[in-house]
Image: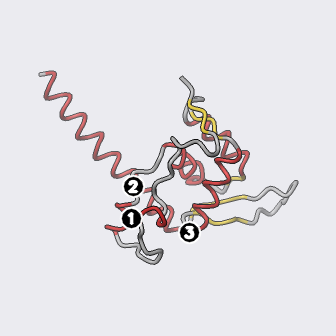
């Protein structure tokens, strides 16, 4: 089953932005960040795409598709909307490539974005450990 993420569809709620949480933009405490989680799968995949190296939009689209084994297919509108919000929240920043070709803009994680991504990974690891323990207990 493929999930096609199209711009404007209500199921793509990128729920971690401060204006949806009524959270002050300057509040980057652990508690405030944890309230921003969990991330949606498309946003998590976008951030993971940028975790290794700076990427431009088309490379992010292809990387997200590859990481999700084709389940998540971002439209350009959805991708650039998410990138705009991630830029506004200082999770990512524009990156000047040495070879600028066809006006492509590259993006990379900020230190804050990398910390927030790591918090989400840690949260997911905790849930996975808990689920593994609960399922293993049930099977014995």
Write down the residue under mark 3: 90
Examine the image and state in which quarter residue 137 appears. Answer: top left
Q: Which of 105 and 87 is in front in this view?
A: 87
Q: In the image, residue 56 lies at what x, y percent?
A: 72, 53
Q: Residues within 10 Å of mark 1 (few under 14, many from 20)?
A: some
Q: Would residue 1 appear left or right of 65 to someone viewing this image? A: left
| Vertical order, 82 against 74 (above or below) | below
Q: Residue at x 19, y 35 (%)?
A: 133
Q: Is residue 110 left or right of residue 130?
A: right
Residue at 63% in and 40% down: 6
Q: How crowded is mark 3: few (under 14 residues within 10 Å), some or many (20 or more)?
A: some
Query: Label 1, on which residue?
Result: 33
Left or right: 45 as drawn, with respect to 97: left
Q: What element carries label 1?
A: helix
User: How far is mark 2 from mark 3, CA to CA?
Assistant: 16 Å
User: Spatial distance from mark 1 to mark 2, Cα to Cα?
Assistant: 7 Å
Q: Residue 91 carries which label?
A: none
Where residue 29 appears, as percent x and y from the top left, is: 36, 72
* Left or right, residue 122 beside residue 46: left
Residue beneath label 2, please?
37
Residue 57 position in % (x across, y down): 71, 50
Mark positioned earlier in the residue sequence (2 or 3): 2
Of residues 93 and 40, the one nearer the viewer is 40
- Badge 3 or badge 1: first in the primary sequence: 1
Q: Gap in Å between the C-alphas at discs 3 and 1? A: 13 Å
Q: Residue at 80% of width from left, 63% of height from top?
A: 98
For residue 65, which quarter of the picture?
top right
Residue 69 at what x, y percent from top left? Answer: 57, 29
**Is disc 1 in contact with disc 2, using a CB cutoff of under 8 Å?**
yes
The image quarter in which residue 7 lies: top right
């Amino acid at each position: 089953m493929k999930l096609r993420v199209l711009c404007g569809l209500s199921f793509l709620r990128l729920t971690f932005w401060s204006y949806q949480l009524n959270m002050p933009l300057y509040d980057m405490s652990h508690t405030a960040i944890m309230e921003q989680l969990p991330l949606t799968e498309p946003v998590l995949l976008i951030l993971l795409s940028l975790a290794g190296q700076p990427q431009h939009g088309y490379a992010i689209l292809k990387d997200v598709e590859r990481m999700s084994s084709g389940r998540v297919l971002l439209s350009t509108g959805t991708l650039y909307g998410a990138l705009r919000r991630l830029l506004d929240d200082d999770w990512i920043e524009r990156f000047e490539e040495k070879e600028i070709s066809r006006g492509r803009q590259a993006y990379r994680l900020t230190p804050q974005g990398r910390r927030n991504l790591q918090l989400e990974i840690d949260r997911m690891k905790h849930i996975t450990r808990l689920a593994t323990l609960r399922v293993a207990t049930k099977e014995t």
